[in-house]
Image (tube, helix red, strand yellow):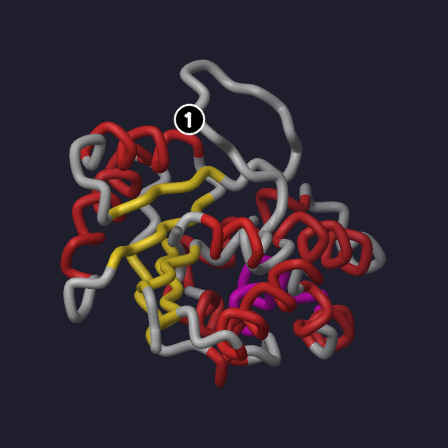
């Protein structure tokens, strides 16, 4: 019998976006001297990642990035954190509950990553919110206030995110509600101001199950 609703952030929790950016940066360095962060971000802001090849051609019309992108994109499934893959597989095998991805970012690119991850069929739901980079607090607020609507059958909800502001806010909002449990996944183990309580440094299915008893 399913025990809870598991809600996971995508980047930094399930998918290793730092490694992806590092690999893509290395590949693109062979084609352009344009700063990687500028190139990478402009392709989202101006065109969306669904047209990623066209976007980069427009930014630098005399450069063909197709080869670099194809090499990196062909390895999408390799960017799933090993502990995340095990965690999701075990959550399904143990029938712990529904698994939902709650992410923020470019709709096309987030969808591309999830579809190519190799674990999309293990997920029950995917929710992608707009990523407002000018007002990052709005993402934390949007995620936090959406949580009650993601619950089903009055089961408890565990929300795991790697953004301490998002989890800190959620812990404040639901401090008197023991059916919603926000958990900060801090893979770097670095402390921040107003560190959310009880951080995890990896996804651990046994630790998750211990919350249920």
Residue furthest out toward the front:
213
Q: Is residue 61 magenta?
A: yes
| Residue 51 visible in image | no
Residue furthest out toward the top:
193
> Which range is magenta?
54-65
Residue 115: x and y, percent? 51, 80
| Residue found at x 37% / y 71% | 97
Left or right placement of residue 63 versus residue 44 in this view: right
Residue 48: x and y, percent? 42, 65
- Residue nearer the viewer, 84 or 206: 206
- Residue nearer the viewer, 50 or 184: 184
Residue 105 lies, with reference to residue 115, above or below; the image says above
Residue under label 1: 196
Residue 67: x and y, percent? 77, 75
| Residue found at x 48% / y 50% | 210
Circle 1: is it few (<14), some (14-19), or many (20+) Cα within 10 Å?
many
| Residue found at x 26% / y 56% | 156
């Amino acid at each position: 019998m399913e025990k809870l609703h598991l809600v996971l952030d995508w980047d930094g929790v399930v998918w290793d976006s730092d490694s992806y950016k590092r690999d893509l940066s290395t590949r693109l360095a062979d084609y352009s001297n344009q700063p990687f962060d500028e190139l990478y971000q402009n392709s989202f802001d101006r065109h969306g990642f669904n047209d990623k090849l066209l976007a980069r051609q427009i930014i630098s019309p005399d450069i063909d990035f197709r080869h670099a992108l194809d090499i990196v994109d062909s390895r999408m499934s390799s960017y799933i954190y090993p502990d995340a893959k095990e965690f999701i597989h075990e959550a399904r095998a143990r029938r712990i509950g529904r698994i939902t991805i709650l992410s923020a970012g470019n709709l096309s690119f987030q969808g591309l990553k999830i579809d190519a991850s190799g674990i999309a069929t293990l997920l029950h739901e995917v929710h992608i919110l707009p990523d407002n980079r000018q007002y990052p607090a709005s993402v934390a607020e949007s995620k936090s206030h959406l949580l009650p609507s993601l619950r089903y059958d009055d089961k408890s909800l565990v929300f795991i995110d790697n953004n301490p502001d998002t989890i800190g806010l959620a812990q404040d909002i639901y401090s008197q509600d023991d059916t919603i449990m926000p958990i900060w996944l801090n893979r770097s183990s670095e402390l921040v101001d107003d560190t959310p309580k009880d951080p995890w440094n990896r996804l651990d299915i046994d630790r998750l199950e211990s919350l249920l008893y």
